[in-house]
Amino acid sequence: MRKETADDRIRIFDTTLRDGEQAPGCSMTLREKLRIARALADLRVDVIEAGFPAASPGDFASVKAIADENLGPTICGLARCNREDIEKVHAAVKGADKHRIHVFVATSEIHREHKLKMAKEEILKSATGSVRLARELCEDVEFSPEDASRTEPAYLAEVVTAAIEAGARTINIPDTVGYAVPGEFDQLFRYLKEHVPGLDDVVLSVHCHDDLGMAVANSLAAVAAGARQVECTINGIGERAGNCSLEEIVMALATRSEYFGLETGVDTTRLYPTSRLVSSITGMHIPRNKAVVGENAFAHEAGIHQHGMLQHHSTYEIMRPGDVGRSHSNLVLGKHSGRHAFRDRVKDLGFDLDEFETNRAFQAFKKLADRKKDLYDGDIEAIIMNVDSTSAGPWMLQSLQVTSQTDQQASAVIRLLNDNGDEVSESAQADGPVAAAFNAIEQATGVCIALKNFELHSATIGEDAQGEVVVTVEHNGNSYRGHGVSVDIVEAGSRAYLEVINRILRRRERGLDTVDGGSDVNRASI
């Protein structure tokens, strides 16, 4: 086996908890962020960008909580080029044995003139001063010239040179708005390698957005040109069209290792369960044709493909399902299956539950087994993903009764239980059963929200398949997503709606339920 060296090692910098969370409706609770951070540590990413501490007190608290768990990867926080941001990042991440301050400033002409209204010299001074300040607090400092792909190459080289001289140990070149194409991006990296003294002494990084669908291609072009860190997110989530997809970049390097000659430290068998976890928490459904982790990624329907697969898997599969943590079997358990069989199946699917979560999931499994004839891997995954949200009060669904008849309004009666043990029952009518149930929930909780989107997906196959519902709502100028699963679509939707309301109420308790003013802090991007 080829011995790995520093030069052929690609560091995976995961920014799901920072850039990924900035996607509309993808805000996460502290508990959810911790769960994802632990999954990323199990995945063995090199760096976790845990957030942007200056964005809000909640963001600071979540970054600090993740750092204090000391999970193994380097814990990083993002900062603009000012003392307050930098000091907040240091205070948040210093609890981790390995921690990093990530400083950024925009450098392109369009950002200089229209956003920052600063001259080149001012930006250069701001960048170097901020990197020096960060180095006084932390040995590991990363610098990013925002919108680098649209920055004049000569000026970009000047800024990068100054940042290295000021003490930056990682230089990240972002394609902030997904404007670059692979050949052009390759040339930019090669230009910097030729014109920036000392660039070979630091880690060269890349951060690409997917506005033109080329984030992974651009990242691979940068890698071929010398980048040794790739910044990416699980499922490619992020602002606008998202970021470079972690699972795609990792498997491209692994599958085409003979071409790239490079390796990552990622445990690829954890890719699929981590993908499903992030999808469940954020409510961002994974398209069936999504590369690597989509439901169709290893499906073969065409007769000629099936014939080839029967002869040898490599005819139409360049990866095996097990390589990314996908199960080889599908039909798994029934209502007579015991706790040990259930626990083993959960482990085979790549999930690591504690005793409390296992017990909750098993109870949900037994209830589902009484309602479904056959249970599939997708059913088990849906149960696991729903376990964490079902206990996130203050309201819990007790029962739901819906009546619907052609040419008449539907009616719903709902019973909820709150944290104090009080039961509340409300009824409502609407044009359809889902709307009636949602109206009853609003009356019971006293929270009125505006439904913007309702998505329904099948968790498995068959007429008794569980329905996964994702709702997107707006409240006080903020966007929220909720997720619910059930064999009853109205119940699944009600659970998703109730999850959103619980999230709003928890934010209200923490004093965070205010109108989002759309500040630059909340929209910071590289």
Image (cartoon, rainbow, N blue to C red):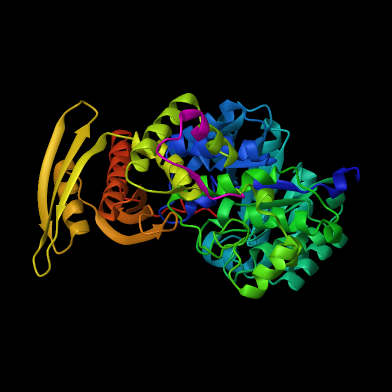
Q: Is residue 257 magenta?
A: no
Q: Residue at horizontal 59%, vertical 51%?
A: 233
Q: Residue at x 78, y 55 (%)?
A: 227
Count of marks overlaid on the render? 0
Q: Is residue 362 above or below residue 15?
A: above
Is residue 494 rendered to the left or right of residue 455? left
Vertical side of 200 occupied by 167: above or below: above
Residue 370: x %, y % from top left: 33, 41
Location of the N terminus (image quadrant): top right
Residue 352 visible in this rendered orientation of the protein = no
Q: Quadrant of residue 406?
A: bottom left
> What is the span of residues highlighted in magenta in the rendered image?
328-342
**Does any portion of residue 186 appear in the rendered image?**
yes
Which residue lies most toward the right here? 2
Residue 292: horizontal and vertical position, in percent? 63, 58
* Front-most of residues 440 and 315: 315
Q: Position of residue 71 (x, y in %)?
A: 62, 30
The answer to whether residue 241 is left or right of residue 263 is: left
Query: Above or below — where is 46 with respect to 479?
Result: above
Query: Which of these two is toward me, 469 or 338?
Result: 338
- At 48% from the left and 25% from the top, the residue drawn is 355
